[in-house]
Image (spheres, rainbow, N blue to C red):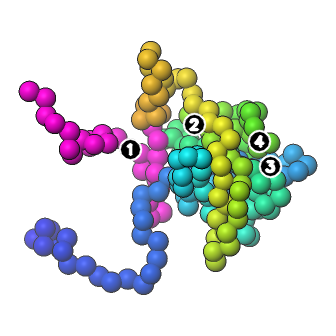
Amino acid sequence: MQEDLVYCKQEWKPGNMLYPVPAVMVTVADKRGQDNIITVAWTGTVCTNPPMVYISVRPERYSYHMIAETGEFVINLTTKDLAYATDYCGVKSGRDTDKFASLRLTRQKAAKVTPPLIGESPVNIECRVTKCIELGSHHMFLAEVAAVHASEAYMDEAGKFHLEQAGPVVYSHGAYYDLKNILGTFGYSVRKKKR
C-alpha cells in the first residue's frame, strides 16, 4: 500500500522544495567593528576554480547592511552541539542581543576578513563578496573564498579531515537533522568490485 503512494503525487504551487539544505551560522561585521551572527539555510557552492559560494539574505535582516557595507562574511558550519545556537541565531535579532555573549560562543580572529570566526565551528569559510544579485525576497551574495579553517580535532594521522565526526546538521522543512550513515562514496555506483 505504502509503495503505491510513492507514485501518487500532488501538485503544489511553486516553492522551494530542494531539501535538505545546510544550516550555517554566518558571521558578519560592519565598518565600526560591530559583529553579528545570522543563521542561513540558502547557501551553497557556486564554483570550484575560483572557489566561490553564495548566501541569500532578506534585505530587512539586521545582518544584511553589514554584508552590503563591508562585502565580507564567514560561513561557519554547524554541528549537533551547535544546533541550539544555530536556531537561536536564526530567530533572535542582533539588534537586540550580542549572540556571541548570549550563547557563550568564542570569537576567533579571521585571517583575511574582518568578521570573526566561531571557534566552536569545525569549519570556517572566509568570504569576500564579488556581486550582489537582487532576486526578490532574498538578495544573493556571490563570494570568493578567501580562506578556510578546519579544526584539527577532526583530522586523522594522515591529515584527512573527517567532518562526519563533528556531527554536521542539515535543515529540512522547519527541522534540524543530523547525518548518521554513509550510503556510499563518490563514484561507488561505477567502481569495480574487488575480487
Three-letter amino acid code at the position of disc 4:
Val
Q: Give x and y (percent) for residue 8.
A: 20, 78
Label 4, residues with CA under 10 Å away: few <14, some 14-19, many ≥20:
many
- Marks 1 and 4, Cα distance to the nearest angstrom? 30 Å
Q: Which is more N-terminal, label 3 or label 1?
A: 3
Figure check: 151 above or below 115: above
Residue 179 numbered mark, or none: 1
Residue 123 numbered mark, or none: 2
Q: Which is more N-terminal, label 2 or label 1?
A: 2
Magenta span of residues = 167-195
- Identify the residue under disc 4: 113
Q: Horizontally, is 28 left or right of 121 in the view?
A: right
Q: Give x and y (percent) for residue 76.
A: 61, 43
Give the structural element (helix, strand or loop) at label 1: loop
Three-letter amino acid code at the position of disc 2:
Val
Among the 4 quarters of the image, the one containing residue 12: bottom left
- Marks 3 and 2, Cα distance to the nearest angstrom? 19 Å
Figure check: 52 above or below 82: below
Magenta segment's dominant SS is loop
**The magenta stretch spans residue 164:** no
**The magenta stretch spans residue 172:** yes
Three-letter amino acid code at the position of disc 3:
Ala
Label 3, residues with CA under 10 Å away: few <14, some 14-19, many ≥20:
many
Q: Which is more N-terminal, label 3 or label 4?
A: 3
